[in-house]
Amino acid sequence: MTPADRAADRYRGLHGHAPVGVWSAPGRVNLIGEHTDYNNGLVLPFALPHRVAVAAAPRADGRISATTIGDDGVPQRAAAVPIAELAPGGVTGWAAYAYGVAWVLRAAGFTSGAELVITGDVPTGAGLSSSHALQCAVALALLGLAGVTPAAEGPTLPEVAEWVRRSENDFVGAPTGLLDQTAALRCVAGHALFLDIRSGAAEQIPFGAPVLVIDTRVRHALADSAYGERRRGCERAAELLGLPSLREIGPDADLHRLPGDLLPLVRHVVTENQRVLATVAALRAGTEIGPLLSASHASLREDYRVSCRELDVAVEAAEGAGALGARMTGGGFGGSAIAVVPPAAEEAVRAAVRAAFAEHSFTPPRLFTAAPSPGAGRDH
Ligand code: GAF
């Protein structure tokens, strides 16, 4: 059963009638372009086949209410709240992600109540953007109940991505960029999405090959605070250089004016944008992208310092067993790595990663291959 079918089925079971519709959105991996989005830079994500689905129907009382179905199948219901009364800090936990979207849509003029049932198969806490999949599916569901399909009429998908970012920054309180929402909303099957955050220009780059995803199954406590610190470091560096963002760094910029702790951050962002361009060029030319992925990982480990032992072990083991390239994907400090692996080496790479994790007494990793899959949309 797909997440969309399961959401519809569970909605019927919980509420005694069918939902008006079901909408879903995928998780993502970022092929390359890490920690560049909030620096106005370049990213290249693709959508996973795993999705979060939202079955929805209107409520006449102006309230939003949501139930999630956990991996164990047990429903967890968040209290119904009048949309007019939603305010940052007023809702915590998973419900903040869903209700924050209603809060931001209220400001855009969408104020009707809704009953939601949410379920999905995007691994949670794995750096694969399950929370953005949830937020984007909720956004499409709430707009869909109002009779609006983004792109066809009314708000565009980039506008919806911007709303979702605002709900995450201002309602949930996480200072993230635009990568994940845009990936969930705008990716298409068989392609990676080459996105320039500064200009908003987006191009679909054909990329059909599955990559190996290695979920390390750890997320270090440092992740959230370190993300904010890195972001503030980049903003401070741009300010010291007198630039609106690190994207505006030209070839003549005197980076040695920067304090020693900021220089490596800037070096990562500048070289990562260059690697995204080189990866897009390699995909177009049909040449190898693996070494660019490995160089990205080295830069995230040495300069940006957002990797961790488990991610490094995964990358080293994959490369040592025949992967053409590998890197952490997403924010870092745990979560997932990806590896580009020739089909003939896949079994050896999987075995090597498992063996390396066992040798270090890490929790066994979750391994799966994923090919670029469809973005968000209406299922029923
Ligand atoms: C997380 C954030 F949500 C994204 O905005 C992005 O910054 C990413 O980390 C790092 O590239 O997924």
Image (cartoon, helix red, strand yellow):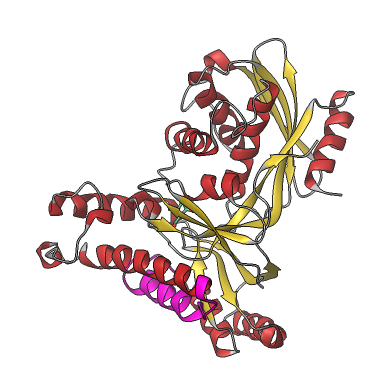
Q: Is residue 318 above or below residue 137?
A: below
Which of 100/143 is in front? 143
Tell me, yes or no, whether the highlighted magenta stretch contains residue 211: no
**Quarter of the image holding residue 13?**
top right
**Quarter of the image holding residue 148?**
top right
| Residue occupying the far front of the picture | 285
**The C terminus: image quadrant:** top right
Count of numbered labels shown in the rendering = 0
Which of 251/72 is in front? 251
Q: Is residue 371 above or below residue 134?
A: below
Left or right side of 208 for 260: left
Q: Which secondary structure class fits the magenta region best?
A: helix
From which residue to which does the magenta span run? 284-308
Picture coordinates of residue 287 (x, y %)? 52, 80
Picture coordinates of residue 135 (x, y %)? 59, 38
Picture coordinates of residue 360 (x, y %)? 57, 81
Q: Is residue 374 above or below residue 8?
A: below
Picture coordinates of residue 294 (x, y %)? 46, 78
Which of 288/5 is in front? 288
Which of 300/88 is in front? 300
Left or right side of 4 for 351: left
Left or right side of 144 for 263: left
